[in-house]
Image (cartoon, helix red, strand yellow):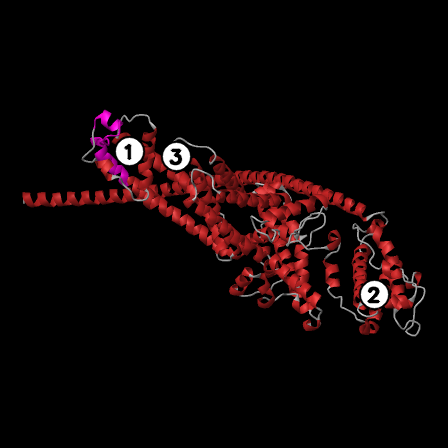
């Protein structure tokens, strides 16, 4: 559910442009991501096998596995967990254990060597007895099974397909270089057959994909189809004779060979060092497109301006357009064409001579002066500024991808594992026979010969969950000597199932047998089979599978002696007890599922109706969730408007208060200033009056003193 929540939140985030809502959604995305990774790590610490089954088990109603949900939403943090890496390693190796490269390639040359050089994961769990004591037919079957496991491993299929593809490219190169004559050779027909086999594999991938959009969303598939179509065009042109000098079939096939060779890069993504580099190249190509948009502005502006000055009044021809673009483009790589700019010794200004191509045209005198200056400025911007900008963009892209290279590699590895895990063992061009066989199986038997390795492989239309497989993994091989010790445990498990279904053991178990009454265990096993059949009749109507009851043949035996000789004597004990244990595990799983369902659901006639109702309920839940999200978006927009209105009102009130306080403060300030001015004026007037009185007194005293001096002077004169 955490992954489903993550997917839904990602989808909502892509559909909204509200930054506030995006921030809120990203918080919940982080929470759901942390929850998903935390649950995965907890499961991985308890049991790796059970964790792998959970990751590859199809989620009901969503028709997707946990891995597919993480891939669809590009949940890199989830894909970077150790449990997911271990799962991919298990699918990559198949039933093989890790080995050296030399041993693996030796086994590729001779698959029979895998019996001696390689170790199989099933050896430890299946070889309870001494292998030397096994009969010869069983040894042969076991060895053939090991060789089959080796051939069906994903890395084995990739290795064989890589070898086949290299052989195809070698043959293609030989035909291009040495055998592409005027007549069509036999090797070309072999190439045609090989390409048809590759086309058949692409058609199989398209047919087995869940949606055609999913197939064409992968860029490598588009490259494959275009490459194959180009080969058919080139091969078809071989039947037509061209009169002109240009050999069109050779050109088309040569370009197609480059495209086929380029397809090898996709195989490198399986390697943890080269895989992230491919993503870097892809992102750098996007950066290069943006750079070219800027570069075109500089190139075209300089190209047209420089050519119009160097060669005025040029004729409107194709060669003129090529000359306009050719020089500025090669300037980027250091080719300056100085002889064309400055003029060579054998150039001419005669229109008839340079028009016919006898002599090159001489540049104008103005161009010889102005264009070198323009070239210097152009080279400064393009070779120094723009190219360094491109290098900086590439460096930023490299650092950003290098930080999450491990998670990106896991994301790439998923598609490689899915592609080669579902491919047949037989490589092109021999896989045509296998495609015909697979088509017959799909049309007639409604059954595919190859299954998805990243989906949990359930028998009986995947009806049993991972819990069934976990329970069946506890089944042990019981021989006749061990029967006395293990039979009470099986009886206890059956009684527990009876209690869950009927609530009382005595409802269907009417009689028990002691060891004295049943010395050969026959009556007790027959009674157990009858009890399991009664349980099966109750559980089967609620099952959505077409599985059958396994113990029918044991119910036909009425005599203990005949049951013993047919099903318990000699080597029959293991088969009988394993069948009973499998039936018990199957019922335990089904009853556990039904036991946890609500009571009203158990009253339905069929479990299919429950599935249909749950599908409808799930779709209604999805619609309700979408409506709720839209309603919340509308509420958020309304709240945002209310918030903005409240803020604007508060701002207006604050502005009015500020203006009022400002006017009051201005009035008080003015009054204070006027008061201070009046006081200062009064003080000045008082001081001025005082100064005037003092000045007058001083003047009068000085006048009196002058008068006295004058009187004294006159007296002295008269005397």
Sequence-first disc among 2 and 1 = 1
Q: Magenta stretch containing residue 356, yes or no?
A: yes
Q: Which of the 4 quarters of the picture holds residue 456? A: bottom right
Magenta span: predominant SS is helix
The quadrant of the image that shows the C terminus is top left
Which residue is painted at 78% across and 44% down in the image? Answer: 613
Specify the segment rendered in magenta: 349-376
Mark 1 falls on what kind of element?
Answer: helix
Rendered view: 627 above or below 280: above
Task: Point out residue 368 in the picture as x, y percentages from the top left corner.
Answer: 21, 34
Q: Which of the 4 quarters of the picture holds residue 517? A: bottom right
| Residue with the mark numbered 3 | 246
Mark 3 falls on what kind of element?
Answer: loop
| Residue with the mark numbered 1 | 306
| Residue with the mark numbered 2 | 493
Rendered view: 285 above or below 495: above
Mark 3–mark 1 Cα distance, whole angstroms, equals 33 Å
Work out whether residue 174 or residue 568 is closer to the camera in this orientation and state it: 174
Q: Are marks 2 and 1 in contact (CB under 8 Å)?
A: no
Task: Point out residue 656 in the picture as x, y percentages from the top left corner.
Answer: 53, 38
Q: For mark 2, does the 10 Å Cα neighbourhood hold few (<14), some (14 to 19), or many (20 or more) residues? A: some
Mark 2–mark 1 Cα distance, whole angstroms, equals 93 Å
Sequence-first disc among 2 and 3 = 3
């Amino acid at each position: 559910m955490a992954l489903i929540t993550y997917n839904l939140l990602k989808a909502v985030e892509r559909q909204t442009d509200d930054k506030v809502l995006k921030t809120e959604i990203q918080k919940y995305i982080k929470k759901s991501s942390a929850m998903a990774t935390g649950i995965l790590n907890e499961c991985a610490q308890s049991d790796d096998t059970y964790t792998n089954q959970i990751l590859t088990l199809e989620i009901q109603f969503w028709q997707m596995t946990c891995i597919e949900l993480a891939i669809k939403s590009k949940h890199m943090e989830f894909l970077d967990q150790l449990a997911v890496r271990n799962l991919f390693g298990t699918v990559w190796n198949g039933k093989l254990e890790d080995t050296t490269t030399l041993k693996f390639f030796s086994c590729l040359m001779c698959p029979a060597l895998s019996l001696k050089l390689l170790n199989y994961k099933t050896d430890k769990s299946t070889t309870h007895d001494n292998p030397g004591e096994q009969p010869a037919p069983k040894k042969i079957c076991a060895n053939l099974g090991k060789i089959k496991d080796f051939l069906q491993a994903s890395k084995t299929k990739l290795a064989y397909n890589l070898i086949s593809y290299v052989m195809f490219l070698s043959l293609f190169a030989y035909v291009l270089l040495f055998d592409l004559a005027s007549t069509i050779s036999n090797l070309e027909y072999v190439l045609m057959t090989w390409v048809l086999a590759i086309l058949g594999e692409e058609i199989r991938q398209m047919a087995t994909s869940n949606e055609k959009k999913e197939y064409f969303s992968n860029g490598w598939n588009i490259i494959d189809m275009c490459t194959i179509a180009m080969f058919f065009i080139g091969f078809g042109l071989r039947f037509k004779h061209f009169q002109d000098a240009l050999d069109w079939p050779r050109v088309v096939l040569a370009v197609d060979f480059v495209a086929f060779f380029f397809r090898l890069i996709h195989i490198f993504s399986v390697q943890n060092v080269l895989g992230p580099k491919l993503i870097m190249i892809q992102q750098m190509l996007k950066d290069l497109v943006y750079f070219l948009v800027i570069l075109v502005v500089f190139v075209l502006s300089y190209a047209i301006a420089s050519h119009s000055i160097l060669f005025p009044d040029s004729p409107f021809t194709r060669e003129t357009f090529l000359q306009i673009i050719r020089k500025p483009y090669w300037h980027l790589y250091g080719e300056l064409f100085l002889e064309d700019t400055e003029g060579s010794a054998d150039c001419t200004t005669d229109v008839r001579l340079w028009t016919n191509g006898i002599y090159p045209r001489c540049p104008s005198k103005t161009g010889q002066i102005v264009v070198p200056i323009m070239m210097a400025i152009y080279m400064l911007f393009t070779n120094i500024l723009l190219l360094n900008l491109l290098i900086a963009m590439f460096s930023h892209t490299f650092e950003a991808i290098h930080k999450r290279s491990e998670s990106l590699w896991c994301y790439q590895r998923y598609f490689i594992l899915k592609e080669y895990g579902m491919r047949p063992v037989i490589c092109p061009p021999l896989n045509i026979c296998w495609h015909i066989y697979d088509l017959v199986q799909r049309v007639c038997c409604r059954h595919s010969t190859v299954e998805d390795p990243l989906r949990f492989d359930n028998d009986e239309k995947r009806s049993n969950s991972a819990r069934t497989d976990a329970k069946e993994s506890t089944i042990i091989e019981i021989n006749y000597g061990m029967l006395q010790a293990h039979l009470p445990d099986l009886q206890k498990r059956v009684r527990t199932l009876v209690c869950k279904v009927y609530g009382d053991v005595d409802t269907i178990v009417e009689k028990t047998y002691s060891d004295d009454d049943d010395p050969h265990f026959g009556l007790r096993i027959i009674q157990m089979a009858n009890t399991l059949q009664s349980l099966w009749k109750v559980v089967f109507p609620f099952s959505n599978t077409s599985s059958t009851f396994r113990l029918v043949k044991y119910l036909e035996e009425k005599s203990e002696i005949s049951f013993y000789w047919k099903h318990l004597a000699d080597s029959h004990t293991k088969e009988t007890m394993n069948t009973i244990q499998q039936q018990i595990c199957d019922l335990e799983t089904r009853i556990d599922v039904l036991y946890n369902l609500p009571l009203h659901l158990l009253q339905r006639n069929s479990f299919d109706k429950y599935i249909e109702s749950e599908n409808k309920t799930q779709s209604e839940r999805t619609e309700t969730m979408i409506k709720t999200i839209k309603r919340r978006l509308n509420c958020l927009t309304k709240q945002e408007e209310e918030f903005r209105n409240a803020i604007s009102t508060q701002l207006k009130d604050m502005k009015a208060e500020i203006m009022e306080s400002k006017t009051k403060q201005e009035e008080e300030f003015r009054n204070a200033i006027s008061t201070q001015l009046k006081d200062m004026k009064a003080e000045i007037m008082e001081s001025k009056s005082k100064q005037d009185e003092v000045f007058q007194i001083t003047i009068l005293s000085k006048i009196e003193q002058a008068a006295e001096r004058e009187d004294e002077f006159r007296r002295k004169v008269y005397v």
